[in-house]
Image (spheres, rainbow, N blue to C red):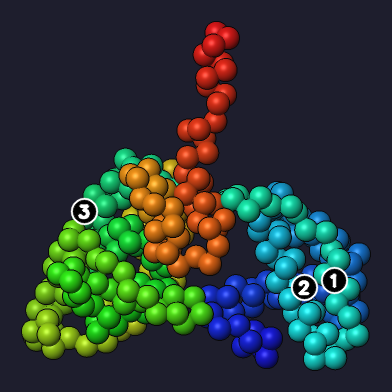
Amino acid sequence: MAWLLSFDSKNTRDAYRLEIERWFAFCGETGLDPLKARKSHGDVYKRWLELQAGKPVPPKTMQRRISAVSSWYEYLADEEIIDANRFKRTRRPKVSRGYSETTALTRDEARALVAAADSDHGPARLRTSAFIRVLLHTGIRIEEAISADLSALGHERGLRTLRIVGKGTKPKKRRLPVETGYALDRYLEDRARRVGVEVSQLSGRIFVTDTGGRFYRSSASALVTRIGRQAGILAKVTAHVLRHTWASLAAELGADPFEIKEALDHESMDTTMGYVHSGRQLERDPSQLVASALE
């Protein structure tokens, strides 16, 4: 628990908790004392993960899983609970800096997603319309969207803004497009009407449940996936896919890569380029050029 709490980001803590639970499950199944793990155990663990999945684990996912466990052992070594982190020598897949396993939506798919959100039914339909637009129009993380308070909405130099807290509790102000602001206004006006107050009297987070409760990440993620299915998109749509889509479309429409990096709150341009290229890898594959020339 101390190791998990050493990370500032809740998302990182949640992800690493899952990874260490996987490792403990492996140790329990094989009878391995976790404090005696060595490189060879890590090599066996990789094969065990593939057996559990029933298929090869994507390189970046495997790299992340091994790195998470190694991070824990590094912490134990620093605390002198073990003499050294021997797990860190476990071989990890080599992954290109610009590689990403997430594929962005096409422009037509993104439009279909917005249309599906607008066609949603029920008392939360205006929230759905606004929420999908916030993610797709700005590329912010889902956690940033659901944790933003109403006080984070503002204006600056004639533009509407949204103040978010990025990774590592770094505050950042993002521009809200006109279309996004309009969808938010409709949602907030409806929300205020249903509780019998003016919009200015609303408080708490921007996005809440029908009863005014907390809109949890699990519910928000399920909403994005459901709207993706309703849009007829074959691949599973997640909030991270929408973030990649924003980056890919921004680059396609001529945005400066540095400005995309700053908007996404990335520390490295390599990470940003992985987002930008992931949606266009197949379109840029020269295979069709070669086949057409030969046939």
User: Residue 128: where, in percent of width, then height?
Assistant: 26, 64
What residue type is disc 3 on? Answer: Ser
Label number found at residue 221: none
Q: Is residue 115 above or below residue 35?
A: above
Q: Residue at x 53, y 21 (%)?
A: 288
Viewer-proximal residue, 31 or 146?
Answer: 146
- SS at circle 2: helix
| Mark 3 or 2, nearer chain start | 2
Viewer-proximal residue, 161 or 197?
Answer: 161
Q: Residue at x 37, y 43 (%)?
A: 252
- Image label count: 3
| Mark 3 or 1, nearer chain start | 1
Q: Quadrant of residue 15?
A: bottom right
Q: Which residue is mark 2?
A: 70
**Cα–Cα gap, marks 1 and 2:** 6 Å
What residue type is disc 2 on? Answer: Ser
Label number found at residue 87: 1
- SS at circle 3: loop
Q: Which class describes the residues within 10 Å of circle 1: few (<14), some (14-19), or many (20+)?
A: many
Farthest residue, direction top: 295
Q: Which residue is mark 3?
A: 119
What residue type is disc 1 on? Answer: Phe
Do the residues under discs 3 and 2 have CB atoms within 8 angstroms? no
Do the residues under discs 1 and 2 have CB atoms within 8 angstroms? yes
Q: Residue at x 26, y 56 (%)?
A: 117
